[in-house]
Amino acid sequence: MTRMTKHKVFLLLLFSGAGFAFLAPATATADPLRMCTNCHGPDGLGGDANTPIIAGMADVVQEDALFAYKDGDRTCTIGPIMCKMSQKLTEDQVTELAAHFAAKSFSPANEDFDPALAEKGKAINARDCAICHGADEPGDPESGILHGQRKGYLRIALQQYAAGERKQMPIMEKKTTALSADDIEALVNFYASFRL
């Protein structure tokens, strides 16, 4: 099937209410969008403290994350669900899902935070993270969204980066592996302080 034909089939199915059903070859999951919305919600904002907000996150970031789970480069420490679900996705499904959630509007989690820790985290962010992730608001969309992200997810991700358990770019690794537990908690509170 040519790319143009696939596009026409996608539009036909999308407007007929079938949505992502076209992405379901016999070896893939039959309803990848529903599989994602079970945790991340239909709007990509989720609700669980350990589930990241993926609405508005650049599609390339989401594709990288899904392939990292799928390929075993990123582990599932809270529960195996992301690793298991990503194994069922085809490359086309990963691309379509990433584009779907990237098109949604980001909204910060608006969780409680400790102002004193947030101030400390602001200084760490300015020193180590702001060049890519932004100083007081989200930076380059292709660097991922930290400002306003869920605290539980950020804590887990930063702990994994600091321990060298999550694949990262060398420039980031030099900074994250030097983070103490107190630094991580300060950063988590700083990013949680972001409001629109």
Image: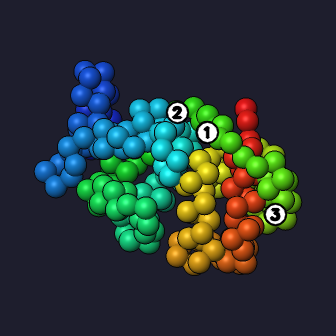
Residue annotated with mark 1: 109
On screen, 152 above or below 111?
below
Residue 27 image point, x, y percent:
16, 55
Residue 44 image point, x, y percent:
48, 38
Residue 170 image point, x, y percent:
66, 77
How many labels were placed on the picture?
3
Looking at the picture, which amino acid does disc 1 mark?
Answer: Ala
Residue annotated with mark 3: 124
Secondary structure category for the residue under label 1: loop
Secondary structure category for the residue under label 2: loop
Residue at the image point whose x is 48% and y is 49% from the top: 51
Residue at the image point whose x is 69% and y is 56% from the top: 188
Secondary structure category for the residue under label 3: helix
Residue at the image point whose x is 33% and y is 50% from the top: 92
Q: Residue furthest top?
A: 16
Along the viewing direction, whichever of 105 and 188 lies nearer the viewer: 188
Along the viewing direction, whichever of 30 and 13 lies nearer the viewer: 30
Q: How did the renderer colour the structure?
A: rainbow
Residue annotated with mark 2: 104
Q: CA distance from mark 2 to mark 3?
A: 30 Å
Dot 2 surroundings within 10 Å: few (below 14), some, or many (20 or more)? some
Please identify the quadrant where the N terminus is shown.
top left
24 displayed left or right of 47: left
Q: Earlier in the sequence, mark 3 or mark 1?
A: 1
Dot 3 surroundings within 10 Å: few (below 14), some, or many (20 or more)? some
Along the viewing direction, whichever of 71 and 111 lies nearer the viewer: 111
Q: Earlier in the sequence, mark 2 or mark 1?
A: 2
